Image (tube, rainbow, N blue to C red):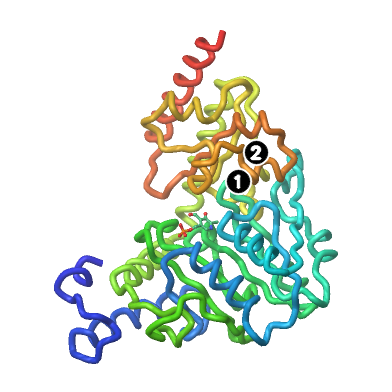
Amino acid sequence: MVPWLSEHYGNPHSGHSLGVESHQAMGQAVCQIAQLLNAPVDSVVMTSGATESNNLAIRGMCLHPRQKRRHIVTVTTEHPAVLDVFADLQSSGFRVTHVPVQQSGSANAGIVDLQKLEEAIDDDTALVSVMWANNEIGAIAPMTEIAGLCHDRGALLHSDATQAVGRISVDMIDVDIDLLSATAHKLYGPKGTGLLIVGNSNRRVRLNPQIVGGGQQSGIRSGTMNPAGIIGMATAMQLCNDGMQVHNDRVAQLRDQIWNTLNSQIEGLQLNGPDFDRERRLPGNLNLALPAIEGQAWMSAVPEIAFSSGSACSAAHSAPSHVLTALGIDESRARRSARFGVGRFNQVQDIQTACEMLVDGHSKLLALAH
Ligand SMILES: Cc1ncc(COP(=O)(O)O)c(C=O)c1O
């Protein structure tokens, strides 16, 4: 990214040689992104991140003047960047259905209930939005089946694939998704760069622009594009894609190491979310409930370890995680929960050290409580 912030600083939309140079490099990066997702190159819209992409996908599709259907469907465990857009559209007259997920205690806990989803989609359904993988519990949605259910009723499918891109295979042809959001900072790329794929080779999708102005990106998303961010995102996606399976095997082993170590030393731990199985759960995700201590207190007792008691995005709210409560987990257990994300740069020794500190912090809190 650095050369595109320093010596090659041309505005990619300018016709002079500096601009053309930026435009060409950025164009190559967009092609690389399209190839990695198996999407047509002209379907890629670059944004500031997944929040913007979700807003553009959902609002843009629903508010297009040729869109006549007035019902939209999503899932209870979605990120606020989807749920809040649905709430907004509901207040402007759209009928909204929130489909439940399978409940805690089942191997599929947190995975959307396909029967309820099928029942929810009707002939007035414009759009269904289902996240590919959940940010708190790592639950992976059966996207192929979901795409079939939507298209059978003439509805389009959007997926917030923020947690899936770069971690598991995401292919716009294999799965036939109409709109797909992702962000660079979840795959070791820069913050402030994201993408929306609009349509695929099977279907065209019309969007009403949400940001108007200079007409860049065919008028779908105006504003000067960010060559350094886009080149950074493409490179990060390529690196994540290369050797993904090998990294996932390693990351899953490290995640299991955390669970097994903590479970052997803290009595009464409970696992939140689906079973550890590649089809059901992201390999690096762990979400667990302590028997007696709140996740927030555990975090404060072990500040050296970067884990969280909810999602980073909702950590500012004091309410228990809406994802955990949607699984039927009660408020007390939700508050006693903590989430760990293993990264591809973690080593066995890091995990061992982290577990020792976590067990130690937990013991101190227990001693204080008694
Ligand atoms: C599933 C999901 N969607 C959307 C977002 C928001 O992404 P951004 O911060 O790039 O807007 C996040 C978290 O950061 C997320 O985990």
> Position of 336 compared to 229: left or right?
right
Q: Secondary structure at mark 1?
A: loop
Q: In which quadrant will I find the N terminus?
A: bottom left
Q: In which quadrant will I find the C terminus?
A: top right
Q: Which mark is residue 137?
A: 1
Q: Residues within 10 Å of mark 2 (few under 14, many from 20)?
A: many
Where residue 362 appears, as percent x and y from the top left, is 50, 20
- Tell which residue pokes out farthest to the left in this image: 7
Relative to 150, is 245 above or below?
Answer: above
Relative to 168, is 109 above or below?
Answer: above
Q: How many marks?
A: 2
Which residue corresponds to the image point at 34% horizontal and 60% vertical from the top-left?
190
Q: Amino acid at mark 2?
A: Asn
Q: Which mark is residue 221?
A: none
Location of residue 264 (image quadrant): top right
Relative to 29, is 232 above or below?
Answer: above
Location of residue 57 (image quadrant): bottom right
Q: Residues within 10 Å of mark 1 (few under 14, many from 20)?
A: many
Relative to 158, is 39 above or below?
Answer: below
Question: Is residue 34 visible to us here?
Answer: no
Which residue corresponds to the image point at 54% horizontal and 60% vertical from the top-left?
164
Q: Secondary structure at mark 2?
A: loop
Mark 2 sits on what residue? Answer: 272
